[in-house]
Structure formats: C-alpha cells, structure tokens
Image: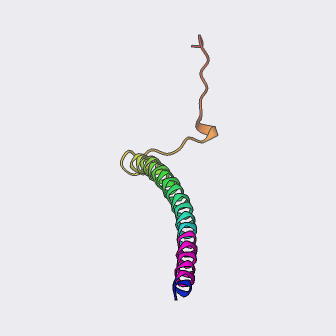
Amino acid sequence: MSFKINIFFAALLVTCALALVNSQYKARNLFIELEKLEQQSRQLDIDWAQLQLDQSTLGKNARIEQIARTELNMAPLSPARTQYLTEGAK
C-alpha cells in the first residue's frame, strides 16, 4: 500500500514540476513580448512627437504664405523681378 502511495506522490511531483517549468517558460516568453511591445510603444511615441512637430511647422509656413497672399497682396518673386545689388554701387 505504501509503495502505491509513493508512486502516486512521485507522479504528482513530476507533474507539478513539469507544470512549473511550462509556466515559467510561458512567463519568460510573455515578458520578452512585453519588452518588445514597450520598445515599440516608445518608438511610436517618438514618431508621434516628430509628426506633431512637423505638422506644426508645416502649418505655420502655409498660414504665413496664405496671409501674405490674401491680406498683404504679396506674390512670390520671379527671377525677372529680382534685382541684385552690389556693394558700393550707386
């Protein structure tokens, strides 16, 4: 009778050990995946900040050009309208 109990507990111990190894393996893989996703999140935050900066800069230049054209009646210079000045010339 005690031999059967020992076999039962040995099998139970091996089963628990295998379950522990399996759960540690899964936890390690999940941790690696979490680290990759956190790195990806940090990179996306950096990209988002850069895109916001680019949008802000582009928006300002377009707004300035629109105001210059509509409210101030300004137009871009063409090469025919450009005058070059030299130093000391009268």
Vertical comparison of 12 with 65: above or below? below
Vertical comparison of 74 with 88: above or below? below
Report the residue that reaches farthest toward the left: 71
Vertical comparison of 85 with 31: above or below? above
Report the residue that reaches farthest toward the front: 1
Whether the magenta-drawn stretch holds residue 12 is answered as yes
Residue 88 or 50: which is nearer the viewer? 50
Horizontal side, residue 3 vs residue 55: left or right: right
User: Horizontal and vertical percent for residue 52?
Assistant: 44, 52
The residue depicted at 57 percent of the width and 66 percent of the height is: 29
Whether the magenta-drawn stretch holds residue 88 is answered as no
User: Horizontal and vertical percent for residue 59?
Assistant: 43, 52
Q: Which residues are drawn in magenta?
A: 6-22
Q: Main secondary structure of the magenta part?
A: helix
User: Horizontal and vertical percent for residue 82?
Assistant: 59, 34
Give the quarter of the figure containing the C terminus. Answer: top right
Residue 81 or 3: which is nearer the viewer? 3
Q: How is the image coloured?
A: rainbow
Residue 67 or 14: which is nearer the viewer? 14
User: Horizontal and vertical percent for residue 76?
Assistant: 53, 44
Residue 45 or 79: which is nearer the viewer? 45
Horizontal side, residue 39 vs residue 63: left or right: right
Label count reads 0
